[in-house]
Image (tube, helix red, strand yellow):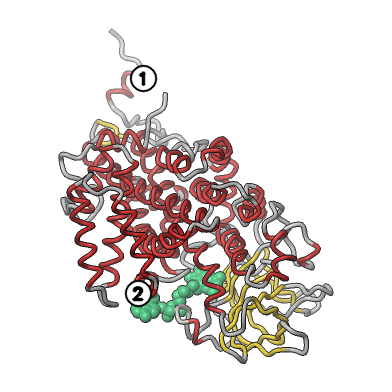
């Protein structure tokens, strides 16, 4: 029998005459469908937004298309550039973005991911936006900043009805019209926010930007310097400044109604760890025209309406990053072999993937529950408003805290390939810590939970009413709820993280016991509540239904 060259190659995998055969590398993940996610679709229906399922599936296919994934990559590779002056020396303070950024923005706004739900009376409209964020979050996180702030500006602006009358229809528009022009003449507007200053971001009461009243009622001029103001090409900003009666909220347009530029000197853009597609700036105000929003002296109370909304978006984006990196990890493990078997078939890798899948499902389920509460609260449900008040701060603390550890582990599933920019994983990893920093850093959110419990007993009531729905269903969950009540009685600033962490895990456990398949709920309760767990992912106990968990999160189609 003669031996062919192909036979020889099979016997000796490294062919002596070929240095660059590519084997054992996965095919591209794209196109894929980020909405192909049971936890997401079940949550969408459960929270009263099943009517939008077809649209969500379409958005999912778009998000996972090669084109949109390419835009996301390019928008991050070609970072925005600040142009302070034109060629003649006039200040222009404009930021130039790569065309991919504009494609992403245009699509996100058109798909209702900015402020559109405020103009949609259908119950579930806000849930649809959050579910959309969970799938669109598989693209680029940076442009989620201006769309989130635009969404969040609306309830704060409503505190000044005559301003809301003019600007709300433009903020809720599905048209993206970039460029600095008179806001009222544009087809759609974007809003940003300027709270943080050099001396303090968490404690905004230390703001030094001053607001001086003019002869015209409600019109002020600002003088001061903000240390972080993202997306400076937005049309209008909600800004905190010290007025004669104390810290107040103002609407600052970049272009005034007469067409002249308002003073908005962008001193520089931040060089950031991640979130590179987005621009985060330091604007200086000097004689800047601003309109009062809400009563003078009630700036925090007014802008907190905005922060409540952006906090939910931080949870959403963290959950989306988890799901995106899990899908990437699962895809790699399915096509990569080591030691004679596919990674996905190796027991220890399956344990890692199952543990990540549990975390991801818990995050997605909690996110959609929070969105449901927000939707019902907006429509006047007081119980849901109380639940939202506490659970959003709890979720913001915990889900965003899990993001960096989760994305690091998912990245490692790709081995060295995951550490390389081409894989996209470093971008997701760099993004993750930001979500627990802005809109209230970890400690600030944990303390906010204490504040809510202390000031408004209805919040604790709403939380325990929710947890009572699973009483008797799982002994570990029952024990966790009882423990939480004890912990609450002894709550202090120093123990706030312990309390909030236990609250988040108990709430996630309760939601999974009610809504997830038994294998998922059981493994979550055993590990996160029962303590049968290690200190890193991939430490599920032998009895955990790993195959069922992996099969649900990462189904093999076809
Ligand atoms: C990329 C990026 C974009 C941003 N964009 C914007 C924007 O568009 N608009 C805007 O207004 N801001 C923006 N921020 C600012 C952000 O909201 C603040 O950085 C954040 O609120 C924290 O404020 P700080 O940086 O001043 O930190 P500090 O307030 O100094 O806090 C430092 C640390 O102390 C902790 N801490 C604070 N108070 C307490 C306490 N009482 N007890 C225990 N610990 C405490 C905090 O949790 C934190 O860990 C952005 C930030 C980043 C990184």
Dividing the picture into quarters, in which one does residue 232 lie? bottom right
What secondary structure is found at the residue carrying circle 2? helix
Dividing the picture into quarters, in which one does residue 303 lie? bottom right
**Which residue does the image show at 42% across and 36% down from the upper left?**
20
**Which residue does the image show at 64% across and 53% down from the upper left?**
116
**Which residue does the image show at 52% across and 56% down from the upper left?**
141
Q: Where in the figure is residue 308, as x and y percent of width and height?
A: 49, 65
Mark 2: C-beta under 8 Å from nearest atom of ligand 1:
no
Q: Where in the figure is residue 357, as x and y percent of width and height?
A: 33, 44
Q: Where in the figure is residue 374, as x and y percent of width and height?
A: 49, 56
Which of the two residues, 503 or 378, is positioned nearer the viewer here?
378
- For residue 473, which numbered disc appears in the image? none
How far separated are the C-alphas under marks 2 and 1? 75 Å
- Residue furthest bottom in the image: 244
> From what the image shows, is residue 298 above or below residue 329?
below
Q: Are marks 2 and 1 in contact (CB under 8 Å)?
A: no
Q: Does residue 527 appear to the left or right of 420 in the view shown?
A: left
Which of the two residues, 554 or 202, is positioned nearer the viewer here?
202
Which of the two residues, 484 or 363, is positioned nearer the viewer here?
484
**Which residue does the image show at 29% across and 72% down from the upper left?**
496
Q: Where in the figure is residue 316, as x and y percent of width and height?
A: 46, 54
Whether residue 327 can be seen here: yes
Q: Dot 2 corresponds to which residue?
A: 454
Q: Does residue 91 appear to the left or right of 400 in the view shown?
A: right
| In this view, the mark in front (2 or 1) | 2
- Pointer 2 or 1: first along the chain: 1
Q: Dot 1 corresponds to which residue?
A: 6
Q: What is the crowding at mark 1: few (fewer than 14 residues within 10 Å), some, or many (at least 20)?
A: few
């Amino acid at each position: 029998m003669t031996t062919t060259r192909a036979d020889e190659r099979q016997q000796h995998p490294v062919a002596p005459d070929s240095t660059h055969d590519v084997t054992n590398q996965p095919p591209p993940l794209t196109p894929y469908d980020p909405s192909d996610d049971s936890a997401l679709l079940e949550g969408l229906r459960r929270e009263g937004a099943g009517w939008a399922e077809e649209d969500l599936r379409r958005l999912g296919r778009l998000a996972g298309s090669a084109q949109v994934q390419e835009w996301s990559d390019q928008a991050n590779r070609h970072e925005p550039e600040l142009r302070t002056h034109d060629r003649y020396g006039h200040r222009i303070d404009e930021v130039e973005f790569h065309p991919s950024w504009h494609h992403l923005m245009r699509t996100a706004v058109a798909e209702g991911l900015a402020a559109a739900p405020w103009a949609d009376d259908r119950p579930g409209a806000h849930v649809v936006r959050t579910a959309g964020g969970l799938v669109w979050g598989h693209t680029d996180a940076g442009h989620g900043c201006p769309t989130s702030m635009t969404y969040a500006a609306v309830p704060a602006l409503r505190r000044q009805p005559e301003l809301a009358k003019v600007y709300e229809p433009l903020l809720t528009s599905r048209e993206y019209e970039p460029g600095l022009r008179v806001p009222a003449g544009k087809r759609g507007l974007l809003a940003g926010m300027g709270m943080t200053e050099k001396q303090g971001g968490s404690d905004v009461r230390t703001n030094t930007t001053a607001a001086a009243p003019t002869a015209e009622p409600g019109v002020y001029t600002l003088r001061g310097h903000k240390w972080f103001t993202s997306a400076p090409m937005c049309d209008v900003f909600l800004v905190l400044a010290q007025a004669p009666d104390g810290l107040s909220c103002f609407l600052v347009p970049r272009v005034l109604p007469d067409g002249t530029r308002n003073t908005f000197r962008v001193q520089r853009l931040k060089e950031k760890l991640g979130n590179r597609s987005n621009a985060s700036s330091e604007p200086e105000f000097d004689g800047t025209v601003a309109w009062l929003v809400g009563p003078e002296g009630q700036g925090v109370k007014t802008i907190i309406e905005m922060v409540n909304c952006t906090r939910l978006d931080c949870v959403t984006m963290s959950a989306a990053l988890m799901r995106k990196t899990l899908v990437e990890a699962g895809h790699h493990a399915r096509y990569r072999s080591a030691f004679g078997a596919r990674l996905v078939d190796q027991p220890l890798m399956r344990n890692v993937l199952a543990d990540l899948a549990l975390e991801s499902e818990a995050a997605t389920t909690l996110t959609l529950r929070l969105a449901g509460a927000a939707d019902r609260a907006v429509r006047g449900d007081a119980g849901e408003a109380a639940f939202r008040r506490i659970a959003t701060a709890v979720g913001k603390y915990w889900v965003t805290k899990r993001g960096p550890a989760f994305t690091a582990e998912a990245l490692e599933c790709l081995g060295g390939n995951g550490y390389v920019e081409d894989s996209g994983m470093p971008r997701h990893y760099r993004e993750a810590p930001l979500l627990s920093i802005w809109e209230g850093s970890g400690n600030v959110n944990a303390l906010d939970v204490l504040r809510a419990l202390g000031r408004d007993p209805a919040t604790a009531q709403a939380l325990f009413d929710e947890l009572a729905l699973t009483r008797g269903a799982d002994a570990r969950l029952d024990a966790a709820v009882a423990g939480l009540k004890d912990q609450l009685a002894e709550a202090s600033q120093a123990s706030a993280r312990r309390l909030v962490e236990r609250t988040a895990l108990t709430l996630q456990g309760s939601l999974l016991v009610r809504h997830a398949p038994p294998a998922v709920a059981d493994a979550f309760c055993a590990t996160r509540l029962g303590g049968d767990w290690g200190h890193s992912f991939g430490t599920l106990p032998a009895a955990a239904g790993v195959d069922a968990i992996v099969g649900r999160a990462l189904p093999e189609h076809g």
